[in-house]
Amino acid sequence: MGLNSECVALISGAGRGIGAAAARTLFEAGWVVSLGMRRPAMPDWAAAAPERVHCFAYEATDPGAATGWAADVMARFGRIDALIANAGVMVPKTAVEVTDAEMAHLLEVNVQAPRRLAAACWEPLAASGRGRVVLLGSLSGKRVKSPGSGAYAVSKFAVVGLAHALRHAGFERGIRAVAVCPGFVATDMAAGITDRPAETMTQPEDLARVIHMLIDLPNEASVAEFCVNCQIEESF
């Protein structure tokens, strides 16, 4: 049986792209959604049931943001059933060219921020008996595609590792963690690094459907990694 309509999900980076699509998909499926955004704004689709949408000013580089967000959600709704850690950044440099400050920023936003969110939501997730953690990794967390994606890939390899670490940490308490690893998705981030037409990329709405499916699976049908691509992968 899937999670019911009383369940609450936190989605970081919910202002656009994959995060916005995931939030809308869960909302339309009956979820209560808490939208973590740098500039909070109620989306148009929330008008159908504004009481099921919560906006929070979330800044991934703020070490205290995760605990503040989780506490705010618990005070309002009394539960957390799923975390979708989607906020991320890209620095298109090789592992040699990237500066210490840029590498630190990549790791802070892409790795430390979702780790802090998971820790802040951990006890409520465990209390549900089937908490869900979805980390937005990347196929760049599975292989290095090009020199210029090297620094970003380092951070995304760490995201995939974090998903597995959380999976082990919470498995006996009913928490299931999964790394969703897409290739090119039609978002602003992808538009800045490729000339591929948006219509040939994976659409955010389709990735949102994948995320919904993964968090709706029972504990006995757990998925550790889910890779999605708009083009064929190399054979090794």
Image (cartoon, rainbow, N blue to C red):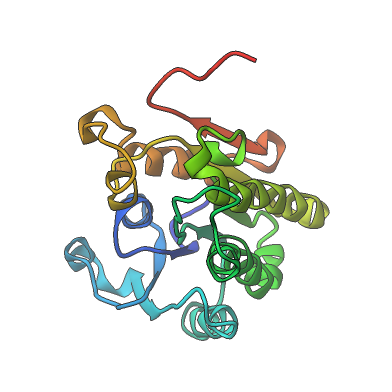
Image position, residue 63 (x, y; %): 59, 82
Image position, residue 75 (x, y; %): 52, 86
Q: Quadrant of residue 214?
A: top right
From the viewer's perspective, is 219 left or right of 85? right
Kindly identify the residue that appears in the image at 65 percent across and 15 percent down: 236
Kindly identify the residue that appears in the image at 60 percent across and 50 percent down: 95
Q: Quadrant of residue 107?
A: bottom right
Work out whether 13 lies above or below 142.
Answer: below
Kindly identify the residue that appears in the image at 52 percent across and 59 percent down: 85
Work out whether 12 lies above or below 25.
Answer: below
Looking at this rendering, what residue extends furthest in the front direction? Answer: 97
From the viewer's perspective, is 39 left or right of 90? left
Is residue 1 visible in this depiction of the protein? no
Is residue 218 visible in this depiction of the protein? yes
Task: Please name whichever residue, 229 or 143, is drawn nearer the observer in this view of the structure.
Answer: 143
Q: How many marks?
A: 0
Image position, residue 183 (x, y; %): 44, 35
